[in-house]
Image (spheres, rainbow, N blue to C red):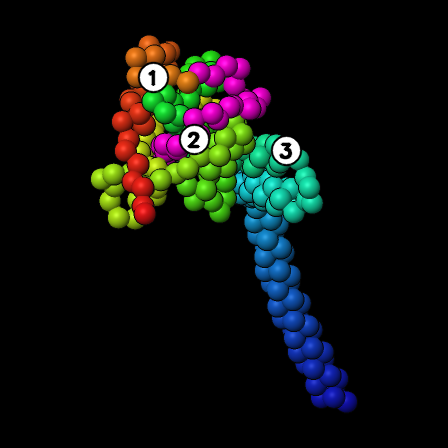
Amino acid sequence: MRRRCRAAADRGDADVGAAQRDGDDHGDAAVRTGRRLRERRGRGRARPRAADGAGDRDRLFGQRRADRHSVAGAGRGHGGDRDRQRALVQRARLRGAALTGTPRRAFSVAVYARRGDRVLVIEHRRLRTWLPIGGEIEPGETPLEAAHRELREETGLAGQFRPLAGALDGVPPGLLGYEEHMAGSKGMHLNFVFVAQVAGDAEVAPNHEFSAWRWVDGAELAAISSPLNVRQFGVLALEARFVHFG
C-alpha cells in the first residue's frame, strides 16, 4: 500500500514537474511571442516616418499623372477649344519641370515671312519686343509642319517653304538655322528658324498675340528693338536664295 502511495506520489511529482516544464516552455514561448509582437509594432511605428517622404513623392507623381490624363482628355474632345487644350499642355509641362527640378525645355519655331525685299516682324504683346512669327512645336509635329501652322494661325498667311541654295541634303525647306534662348516662365526654347516666301500682295490678319506688325527691309530691321539674333536671322532671311525646280 505504501509502495502504491509512494509510486502515486512519484507519478504526481513527475506530473507536476512536467507541468512546470510545460508551463516554463509555454511561458518562454509567450515571452518570445510578446517580444516579436513588440518588434513588429516598433517596425510598424517606424514605417510611417519612412513612408512620409515616399508619400510626398507618390502624391507629386500622382498629380503629374492627373495632369497627363487631363491633357489627354482635352485632346479627345470633339471641336474643343484649341487654346484651352494648349493651356492644359503648357501647365502640365511647367509642372513637370518643377517636379524634376530642371529648367523646362521645349522645341519651337520662328518664321520670317518674306514679301519681296522685306520680312515681317511683330510686336509681341506680352514680351513687348519685336520678333518673327513663332511658337512651340506641338506633339507629333515636325519643325516644318509647326512653321506652316504658326504662320497660318498667327497671321493668316500661306507661306511657301522652298529649299535654300547651298542647303545640305535632308535639311527641311526654308530652314535658316537653329538657336536656343530662355523664354521666361516657359524655360528654354530650342528654336528652328525658317524663312517662307509669301505673295507680293499678301496681307496680315493678326491674332491676339501681337499688337503691331511691320514689313521691314535691311536698314529698318537693324534699327528695331529686339534680341540680337532676331536681327541676325532677319538678315539671313532677306539674303536667302530659294531654289526653284522646273
Q: CA distance from mark 1 to mark 2?
A: 15 Å
Residue 93 relative to residue 219: left or right: right
Q: Nearer the viewer, residue 5 or 94?
A: 94
Residue 11 relative to residue 161: left or right: right
Give the labeled residue for mark 2: 198
The answer to whether residue 143 is above or below residue 10 is: above
Q: Earlier in the sequence, mark 2 or mark 3?
A: 3
- Mark 2 touches mark 3? (CB < 8 Å): no
Give yes or no for residue 197 being in the magenta stretch: yes
Q: Position of residue 109 (x, y in %)?
A: 41, 33
Residues in magenta? 190-214
**Residue 61 falls in image quadrant:** top right
Give the labeled residue for mark 1: 217
Q: CA distance from mark 2 to mark 3?
A: 30 Å
Q: Secondary structure at mark 1?
A: loop
How packed mark 1 is, by other alpha carbons closer than 10 Å (few <14, some 14-19, many 20 or more), is: some
Examine the rendering and report whether any part of residue 187 can be seen. Answer: no
Q: Position of residue 82 (x, y in %)?
A: 62, 36
Q: Which corner quadrant holds the N terminus? A: bottom right
Residue flagged by tag 2: what amino acid is it?
Val
Q: Nearer the viewer, residue 38 or 127?
A: 127
Q: Earlier in the sequence, mark 1 or mark 3?
A: 3
Residue 8 relative to residue 107: left or right: right
Residue flagged by tag 3: what amino acid is it?
Arg
Residue flagged by tag 1: what amino acid is it?
Asp
Q: Position of residue 146 (x, y in %)?
A: 46, 39
Q: Secondary structure at mark 2?
A: loop
Examine the rendering and report whether any part of residue 29 can be seen. Answer: yes
Q: Residue at x 36, y 25 (%)?
A: 116
How packed mark 2 is, by other alpha carbons closer than 10 Å (few <14, some 14-19, many 20 or more), is: some
Q: Nearer the viewer, residue 161 or 86?
A: 161
Q: Earlier in the sequence, mark 1 or mark 2?
A: 2
